[in-house]
C-alpha cells in the first residue's frame, strides 16, 4: 500500500508552521476560522496515519480515497469544538493523534460508502483540505448557482441539459445564460475561499490577493 503524497506539504506557508505543536495548531485553527493553513498543516501531519487505517478497511482504492476525504471533512467540522488534555489533569491525556484515530475508527464504522462506480471524487484532483473549503464556499452560494455548479462539475451536464432541467423546475434560464451563471458562480467560489487556501493550492501571490 502506498501512502499518497500531498504537494501542499511543500508550500512555504505550510512549511512555516511545521514547528508548531498540535495544541498550538488547534488553538490557531479555532481562533482564526477564516484561515485555512492551520487545518492544512494538521492534515499534512496526520494524513499518513489516517490513510493507513482507512486503506486497510476499504474494499477498493477508490472507496478508500473517498472515505479518506469524508473522514477529513468530519475532522474539519469536529475540530472547532475539540479540547485536548494533558496527563497533568489526572485523566488519560487526549492527544491529537489519539483523537484522530478515534474519529477515523468512527468514520470507518459509521459511513456507508456508495459503490465504486458511483463515486466521483478524485484524491489526485482535490486534496481533502481544499475539498472541505470548496464545500464550505459552495454552501454560501445562492441555491440556483450551487445547483448549476454541481450539475456541471459532478454530472458533467451540458449547458443545454442544465437549462432544460431548470426550466422543468420553473426557472426560466436559457442555455447561454447557464454559461454566464457558471462563470459568476466560479468567481463567487474563489472569493469565498480563504486567501491562504488559494495561495496553497493555486499558488496565488498573497501580496496581490
Image: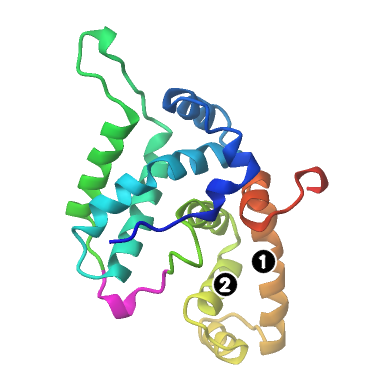
Q: Earlier in the sequence, mark 1 or mark 2?
A: 2
Whole-percent x and y of residue 43?
A: 44, 44
Query: Mark 2 — residue?
Result: 149
Whole-percent x and y of residue 44?
A: 46, 44
- 200 relative to 100, above or below: below
Q: Residue furthest right?
A: 208
Q: Residue at x 56, y 85 (%)?
A: 162
Whole-percent x and y of residue 118?
A: 32, 78
- 158 relative to 122, above or below: below
Q: Residue at x 41, y 69 (%)?
A: 121
SS class, disc 2: helix
**Disc 1 to disc 2, C-alpha distance:** 8 Å
SS class, disc 1: helix
The quarter holding residue 66 reads bottom left
Whether the residues at callouts 1 and 2 have beta carbons within 8 Å, the answer is yes
Q: Residue furthest front?
A: 2
Closer to us: 34 or 165: 34
Query: Mark 1 — residue?
Result: 186
Rendered-image quadrant of the N terminus:
bottom left
Q: Which residues lie in the magenta part?
A: 114-121
The quarter holding residue 174 reads bottom right
**Magenta span has 27?**
no
Whole-percent x and y of residue 122?
A: 43, 69
Q: Is residue 92 left or right of residue 197?
A: left
SS majority, magenta = loop
Amino acid at each position: 500500500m502506498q501512502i499518497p503524497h500531498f504537494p501542499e506539504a511543500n508550500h512555504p506557508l505550510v512549511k512555516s508552521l511545521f514547528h508548531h505543536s498540535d495544541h498550538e495548531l488547534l488553538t490557531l485553527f479555532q481562533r482564526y476560522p477564516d484561515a485555512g493553513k492551520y487545518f492544512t498543516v494538521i492534515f499534512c501531519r496526520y494524513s499518513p496515519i489516517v490513510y493507513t487505517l482507512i486503506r486497510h478497511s476499504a474494499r477498493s482504492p477508490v472507496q478508500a480515497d473517498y472515505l479518506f476525504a469524508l473522514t477529513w471533512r468530519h475532522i474539519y467540522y469536529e475540530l472547532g469544538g475539540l479540547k485536548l488534555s494533558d496527563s497533568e489533569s489526572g485523566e488519560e491525556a487526549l492527544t491529537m493523534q489519539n483523537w484522530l484515530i478515534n474519529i477515523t475508527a468512527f468514520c470507518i464504522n459509521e459511513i456507508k460508502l456508495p459503490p465504486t462506480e458511483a463515486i466521483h471524487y478524485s484524491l489526485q484532483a482535490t486534496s481533502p483540505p481544499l475539498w472541505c473549503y470548496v464545500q464550505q464556499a459552495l454552501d454560501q452560494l445562492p441555491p440556483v448557482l450551487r445547483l448549476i455548479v454541481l450539475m456541471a462539475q459532478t454530472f458533467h451536464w451540458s449547458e443545454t441539459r442544465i437549462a432544460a432541467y431548470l426550466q422543468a423546475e420553473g426557472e426560466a434560464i436559457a442555455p447561454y445564460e447557464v454559461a454566464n451563471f457558471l462563470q459568476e458562480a466560479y468567481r463567487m467560489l474563489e472569493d469565498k475561499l480563504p486567501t491562504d487556501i488559494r495561495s496553497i493550492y493555486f499558488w496565488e501571490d498573497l501580496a496581490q490577493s
